[in-house]
Amino acid sequence: MEFGFCELSLAPVRLQPDDKSEMATQLLFGDLIVVLEKQDKWVRIRAIDDNYEGWIDQKQYLPISEEEFVATRNADAGYVKDLVEVVACKKRNQVIPVVMGSVLRGKKGHIFCMAGREYEFSGNLAAGNEAPDRSALIENALVYLNAPYFWGGKSPFGIDCSGFTQMVYRLSGIKLLRDAYQQASMGETVNLIHEAGPGDLLFFNNAEGQIVHCGIYLGNDKVIHASGKVRVDPVDHQGIYNPDKKGYTHSLRLIKKIL
């Protein structure tokens, strides 16, 4: 078995081994992967945090030993809280941009030891081992406001609905699965929206009853979600009401309490 480390700010993960194939998700700096298969310039990988599988270009990950993989995976994690910052790899004389939600492990002051390398970072981190806090989760969600919607995206410069919920929860040290229907299988069901609390996940279905959208309940009948952009809209037992369109755009199907 082979292992890898994402040393780029973002790397696209595609459904098929082709540059023209749909991007299903992204790796962020610090993400660890297991290599499942190789095909020409492509490798099929599984991301460690959410077990999501897909294809990446072999030039866009750093192969590492099993020993380096285990040591990095077991080190305490912190998550970048700044919209964008940089890390410096002194050994290679490189400066690498990192976006909100990127992971840094093995903290020794401003130095982080990962994948057999040392990286220096002086920005703001959310500690992954602290007890989750609903108010902090909501604050992190609001930082993404007006980030453009981007299918498969997980950064403040392009993000989809489940990528948004996943990243916001990651900043609180909670690992969610990648897609909305997968996240809907997690946590404890809340029966009525007036029983929901800030930070609970809301899921919405299409006409066929499939869960296709999700957001985070803010309380006071408001939801923050990625639809065109990350935005705040009214929500009730029927679904999301879009004031711009003067109508309901998403039908509420399920509420889940994770915290």
Image: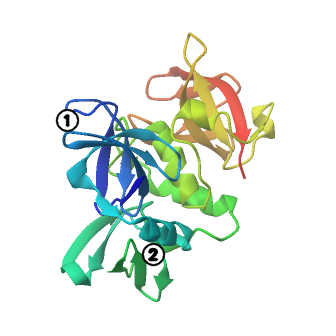
Evaluate whether residue 234 shows in this view: no
What label does residue 66 carry, if any?
none
Residue 216: % across, % down: 60, 43
Q: Amino acid at mark 1?
A: Asp
Q: Is residue 55 above or below residue 7?
A: above
SS under mark 2: loop
Label 2 sits on what residue type? Asn
> On the image, numbered disc 2 is attached to which residue?
124
**Mark 1 lies on residue:** 19
- Tell us which disc is closer to us: 2 or 1: 1
Query: Relative to 128, is 112 on the left or the right?
Result: left
> In this image, 158 relative to 74: left or right?
left
Q: Is residue 256 visible?
A: yes
- Report the residue that reaches farthest toward the bottom: 109
Percent across and percent down for residue 76 are: 56, 73
Question: Residue 199: percent from the left, percent from the top?
Answer: 66, 49
Q: Could you tell me residue 24's position as x and y percent?
A: 37, 35
* Element under disc 1: loop
Q: Nearer the viewer, residue 241 or 188?
A: 188
- Asked if residue 111 is positioned above or below residue 180 in the image, the reply reads below
Q: Which quadrant of the structure image shows residue 9? A: bottom left
Q: As displayed, is residue 120 above or below residue 145? A: below
Residue drawn where x is 50% and y is 39% of the image: 162
List the single residue furthest toward the top.
Answer: 208
3D distance between C-alphas at marks 2 and 1: 34 Å
Bin the neighbour count of mark 2 within 10 Å (Cα to Cα): few under 14, some 14-19, many 20 and up: some
Query: Quadrant location of residue 194?
Result: top right
Q: Residue at x 62, y 40 (%)?
A: 222
